[in-house]
Amino acid sequence: MRRKPYQLALFGLLLIALPAWASQQKPQPPAGATPGSSGPAGPPPAKPLQAGQSADTAPDRVTADEDIDVGLFYMHKGDQDAAIPRFEDAIRKQPKLAKPRLLLAEAYEKKGDKASAAKCYKEYRQAFPNAPDGKKIQKKIDKLTSQ
């Protein structure tokens, strides 16, 4: 494709002007840096603990989600014995989450431990009483406890 002379001239001006323009730009401080500092700021301040909590028992949503993800990985691999402790850890870290309770119940059910599965399904119903799958879960509980 043949370029027109004015296109070549504009391109040439751009090549000349670009280094001069770039040298005039001020470098931006790294994300999280405070004015006058040379490096990034430290981690954000910790959230205050609630009454009765220590730093070791404070809920941590990020690690609870990580435990759920790792547990799901093991479940999909078919290793229920490795998945169960991860879901239990997620429940310990975030007691109000319903998802790890449901997954724990499914893991116990796949393992063949009907009593533990029924118990976890009941805990799921208590943690999430308005669950859209509540009727299905209740049927599972009834089936597991009747056998």
Image: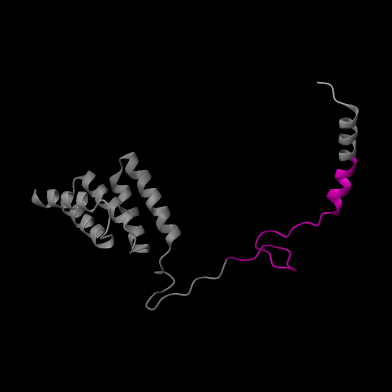
Seen as rendered, the residue at the extreme left is 146
Left or right, 71 with respect to 107, comes to: right
Residue 112 lies in the magenta-colored region = no
Total labels: the figure holds 0
Residue at 23%, 49% (x, y): give it: 108
Q: Give percent across and percent down for residue 104.
A: 28, 52
Out of 90 and 26, give the one closest to the viewer: 26
| Res 30 quadrant in image | bottom right
Out of 54 and 46, give the one closest to the viewer: 46
Q: Give percent across and percent down for residue 38.
A: 74, 64
Residue at 30%, 50% (x, y): give it: 103
Left or right, 77 with respect to 66, comes to: left
Residue at 82%, 54% (x, y): give it: 25
| Residue 94 vertical position relative to residue 138 in the rendered view, above or below | below
Seen as rendered, the residue at the extreme bottom is 51
Q: What colouring does the structure picture have?
A: one colour
Residue 24 lies in the magenta-colored region = yes
| Res 126 quadrant in image | bottom left
Q: Give percent across and percent down for residue 67.
A: 39, 54
The segment highlighted magenta reads 16-43
Out of 137 and 29, give the one closest to the viewer: 137
Q: Give percent across and percent down for residue 64.
A: 40, 58
Out of 121 and 129, give the one closest to the viewer: 129
Residue at 90%, 39% (x, y): give it: 13
Q: Main secondary structure of the magenta part?
A: loop
| Residue 50 vertical position relative to residue 61 in the rendered view, above or below | below
Task: Please identify the quadrant where the N terminus is shown.
Answer: top right
